[in-house]
Every structure is written in C-alpha cells, then in structure tokens.
Image (tube, rainbow, N blue to C red):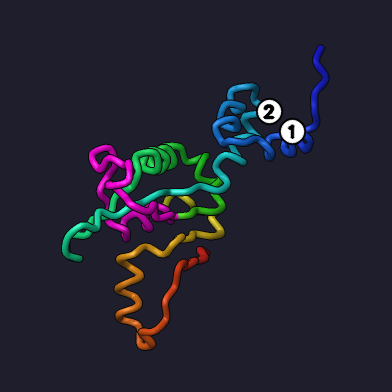
Amino acid sequence: MTPLLPPELLRIILTNLSPPSDLARSCSTSKTFLSIAQTLLYKDIELRIFYNDHGPPEHLRTYIEARSQALLDLLKRHAHLRNFVQTVTIRETLGGGWAGYDCRMSGKIQLRALVEDVIQISPRAKLIAFDPFPFLTATRWIQSSPQGRTKSNSARMKTQ
C-alpha cells in the first residue's frame, strides 16, 4: 500500500510545477490531486488580446487569442471552476495578427464586452489587471482626461 501525503505537502509540491501544462496533467492523477491542482490552475488566469492597428484609428480592431477565448468559454460552462479565479490579467500581445497570430483563428471582440465577461466569469476575483493598459481605451482616457498629461503603462481595477 502506498503511503498518502498530506494535502498541505501535495499543495506545496504542485505549486512548484512548471509549466502549467504539468499542473493540468496532474489533475488526472487522482481525486486528491484534482482538488488541489484545479485551485492552483485557475487561481491566476491570463487573457491575451492584440490589435490590428494598420490603417486609420477608426479601423482599429481588437482580437482575443484563440486559447484565451477557449478559457473564457470553459469558465462560462463550468461554474465550479469560476470560484477558483482570484486574479485575471488582460495582457496586450505586442504585434498582434502580424507577429505570428492568425486573425482568422482568433475572435474579434469589443474590449468592453470582454471586461464584462471577465467580471461575470470571475465572481470571487480580487484583482482584474490590464497589462499594459489597452491602447484604444488608454488613448481615449488620456485625451478626455482634464489633466491630459498623465500617461499610464498599466491600470488595475479592484472588484468588489
């Protein structure tokens, strides 16, 4: 008979797994591993967006990477996974569709709708971060700001 490790020790071991795909594979090891690994796997999630910014500003399009869209869809379908999400980072991928990302394989999105989806799928999130602050929103915010001189590389929004 194999001796059982206490959950506290398993958590320490699983916390140090790298890359995240190893953590995902550990979910299929046993029910004990699943209960610990899932909480770690979905604790901090990252959604990647990019812009097709060739042409005039009115033609700027925002896209979400296919993997990020798949993660959003998964969290929408499985309510129990949503409870594990504590931090969401919306990260702008530099270069966008012209740097190896195929726009046809990614979804065109509205940034506002994405943020609304993120709030919906992460009811227990303590932090939703933009890193760096998405180009279009930042440009409009800076232009409409009374100070007008403030520039920000990132913005963080705490949720209730």
Residue in view at x 40 percent, y 49 percent: 48
Q: Is residue 86 above or below residue 79?
A: below
Where residue 22 appears, as percent x and y from the top left, is 59, 30
Q: Find residue 105 and name its label.
A: none
Residue 101 image offset from top left, x and y in percent: 31, 42
* Residue at 23% from the left image edge and 55% from the top image edge: 61
Do labels 1 and 2 touch, CB within 8 Å? yes
Viewer-nearest residue: 35 or 9: 9
Camera-nearest residue between 76 and 99: 99
Residue 92 location (% of width, % of height): 39, 55
- Specify the quadrant that holds the N terminus: top right
- Residue that lies at the very extreme toward the bottom in this rendered image: 146
Name which quarter of the figure residue 149 lies in: bottom left
> What are the residue bounds of the magenta stretch?
90-119
Pick whichever of labels 1 and 2 is earlier in the sequence. Answer: 1
- Say what amino acid the circle numbered 1 marks: Leu
Query: Which is in the foreground here, disc 1 or disc 2?
Result: 1
**Residue beneath label 2, please?**
32
| Residue at the top extreme of this rendering | 1
- The residue under label 2 is which amino acid type? Thr
Residue 35 % position (x, y)? 64, 33
Which residue position is annotated with label 1?
Answer: 10
For mark 1, give the secondary structure. helix
Q: Using the numbered discs, state the Cα–Cα distance from disc 1 to disc 2 in whole angstroms.
A: 9 Å
Q: Tell me if mark 2 has few (under 14), some (14-19) or many (20+) residues whose alpha carbon lies within 10 angstroms of its own.
A: some
